[in-house]
Amino acid sequence: MITNMKHIQTTIKDKGIKPTYQRLKILEYLIETKKHPTVEMIYNNMKRVIPTISKTTVYNAMNSFVEKGILNALSVTGTELRYDANTKPHHHLLCNKCRNIYDIYTNSFDFFDKKIINGNKIDEVHVYFKGICKKCLEKGNYKN
């Protein structure tokens, strides 16, 4: 874990952000979780580790991390922002049953390799799928 924390500290410093204890712990949590949490989820988790942390601190850290490209902000549900520490090209699936968000890797789209499409300069691509995740399918936790 110490090696991971040193990597996190270097990542934050290299992006010009002061590596405070709160920021380090927040980013550590985001790297370790695959749940694409909201600020509220991050805050509730961080309160267990840092009881004095404020929601404002979490919001400010998220804004800095997104602005510097350390995290991606997702609007998969359309009603809330979720955060993803995986900045490699991938898509997301929102399960209509359990409401979890999962990373989806597919070669079916070649958007990521293109910088210009139909004469338009592309900076980012976001593809969101909505359906039933494999865990819910395995449980028979869905209706056709």
Image (cartoon, rainbow, N blue to C red):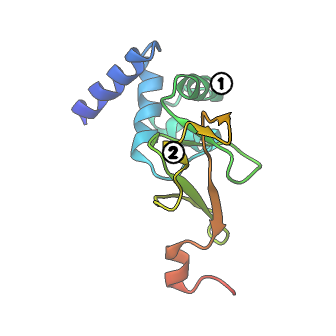
Q: Are marks 2 and 1 in contact (CB under 8 Å)?
A: no
Amino acid identity at mark 1: Thr
Dot 2: element: helix
Residue farthest to the right? 79
Label 1: how many Cα within 10 Å (few below 14, some 14–19, many 20+): few
Dot 1: element: helix
Q: What is the x, y in percent for residue 114? A: 53, 42
Mark 2 and mark 1: Cα distance apart in space: 34 Å
- Quadrant containing the N terminus is top left
Q: Is residue 85 left or right of residue 83?
A: left
- Front position in the image: 57 or 116: 116
Height in image: 7 above or below 128? above
Q: Residue at x 62, y 47 (%)?
A: 126
Tell me where residue 101 sits by quadrant: bottom right
Give the labeled residue for mark 1: 56
Amino acid identity at mark 2: Phe
Give the labeled residue for mark 2: 112
Tell me where residue 54 sits by quadrant: top right
Residue farthest to the left? 3
Q: Residue at x 46, y 52 (%)?
A: 34
Residue farthest to the front? 119
Disc 2 or disc 1, which is closer to the eye?
A: 2
Q: Residue at x 61, y 25 (%)?
A: 63
Q: What is the x, y in percent for residue 6? A: 27, 25
Label count reads: 2
- Front position in the image: 34 or 55: 34
Disc 2 or 1, which lies upstream in sequence? 1
Height in image: 26 above or below 127? above
Q: What is the x, y in percent for residue 66? A: 57, 29
- Quadrant containing the C terminus is bottom right
Q: Residue at x 46, y 58 (%)?
A: 105
